[in-house]
Image: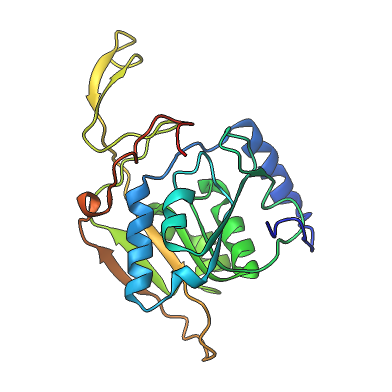
Amino acid sequence: EGEAQMRGQNKSSAVMQQRQEARDALDDFPTPMWATRALCAALIAKGYDLGACVVREPCANRGYMVHPLGEYFGDVLASDVHDYGAGFQVMDYLFGFLPDSVDWTVFNPPFRLAQQFIERARATSAGVAVFVRSAFLEGEERYKTLFSQDPPDIVLQFSERVVIHKGVMRQAGEKYWDPDADEGRGKWKSASSATSYCWMIWLPKSGTAKENQTTFNWIAPCRPRFEREGDYAPLGDLS
């Protein structure tokens, strides 16, 4: 699906070392579908015709971001470095040849590799939207090598917490049993998160010179608006 014809292999030693680490300790943090729908709604509000666009999702996991992207975009090219059993193409987005260009790349990358993912996405798509912890916006080295050179056009900060748990999809407030809590005695918990998240967006070039200025805005509380029946299906049961 357009992934086969690739070029420009990335042989950076830093990337190769980090990719080896990533295979041994995969970042399995699926993104709630409503958070992706909130992004798509924001792009449509800015006038983008997503239905006419091809989007790539190179961190497909079990498809929790792929499926809502498919609700808005004309075509979705989904892949992941690991086979999570969802039927997506298994490929290493960083350590390999540059994939063919697409209209958009939208993804939730491993935190420690996010900058490399962004750089590759910027080289292979007109628009890029990255879901990251808000803490990604800070850091002297990241400012020096990324934000001062190629800042996003827009940062959209979620005003409500996006609940993300490792290896499982849970709805905010959902009750679940944590067998490791309370010194191994186990405890019922309510799904929540102490981490804030945002979307960083690089818009397709309009032909005018970029001003290297970033617009910061908030995504108003919208989870009930964008949640759909079946969004929190057990892992592997998406269809």
- What is the image's colouring? rainbow
State whether residue 113 appears in this view.
yes
Q: Position of residue 50 (x, y in %)?
A: 45, 69
| Total count of labels | 0
- Judged from this view, the residue extending furthest toward the bottom is 208
Q: Nearer the viewer, residue 148 or 155?
A: 155
Residue ID at (52%, 38%): 27
Q: Position of residue 12 (x, y in %)?
A: 75, 54
Q: Nearer the viewer, residue 99 or 164?
A: 99
Residue 36 placement: quadrant: bottom left
Q: Nearer the viewer, residue 237 or 105?
A: 237
- Judged from this view, the residue extending furthest toward the top is 185
The quadrant of the picture occupied by the N terminus is bottom right
Residue ID at (51%, 47%): 111
Q: Position of residue 9 (x, y in %)?
A: 79, 58
217 shown above or below 192: below
State whether residue 134 appears in this view.
no
Residue ID at (76%, 53%): 96
Residue ID at (41%, 31%): 168
Q: Is residue 24 left or right of residue 137?
A: right
149 shown above or below 7: below
